[in-house]
Image (cartoon, rainbow, N blue to C red):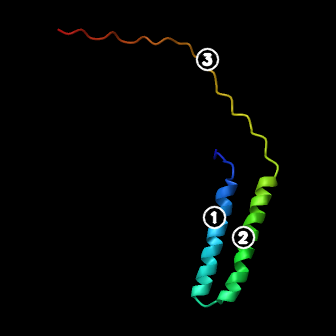
Amino acid sequence: MVHRHATDALSLVFGIVFAGITAIWLLNVTDVIDLQQAWLIGPAVLIAAGAVGLVLALRPSRPQQPAAPTPEVTDTTEIDWPEEPTSP
């Protein structure tokens, strides 16, 4: 079974900010948008990243599922180990 871990909200938000800044830079360098439009899109990226951070921070946390019980060993059969050989 795959173990699910908690989402790291801080890393996700900074990843969104970094990806947004990179996308704005790439669009500006390839002349898809000009510098004036880039200045307008920048705050939109920050607002979107902040909204994602707020949603993740305010969502209700799921209760932790108890760990599966470990099976108890019920076999008490003794093993007859061979005696160690003696040196000649």
- In the image, 82: left or right of 1? left
Residue at figure coordinates x 35%, y 12% from the top left: 82
User: Nearer the viewer's eye, disc 3 or disc 1?
Assistant: 1
* Residue that badge 3 annotates: 74
The residue lying furthest to the left in this view is 88
The amino acid pointed to by label 2 is Leu
Residue at figure coordinates x 33%, y 9% from the top left: 83
- Sequence order check, earlier mark of 3 and 2: 2
Camera-side residue of 45 and 73:
45
Task: Determine the secondary structure under disc 2.
Answer: helix
The amino acid pointed to by label 1 is Gly
Estimate how packed mark 2 is, as few (under 14), some (14 to 19) or many (20 or more) residues with alpha carbons within 10 Å: some
Residue 9 is situated, as x and y percent measured from the top left of the image, at 70, 56
Task: Determine the secondary structure under disc 1.
Answer: helix
Camera-side residue of 41 and 83:
41
Residue 33, numbered label: none
* Residue that badge 2 annotates: 46
Estimate how packed mark 1 is, as few (under 14), some (14 to 19) or many (20 or more) residues with alpha carbons within 10 Å: few
Residue 38 is situated, as x and y percent measured from the top left of the image, at 67, 83
User: Nearer the viewer's eye, disc 3 or disc 2?
Assistant: 2
User: Which quarter shows the N terminus?
Assistant: top right
Residue at figure coordinates x 69%, y 34% from the top left: 67
* Residue that badge 1 annotates: 15
Q: Considering only vertical position in the picture, is 17 above or below 74?
A: below
- Sequence order check, earlier mark of 3 and 1: 1
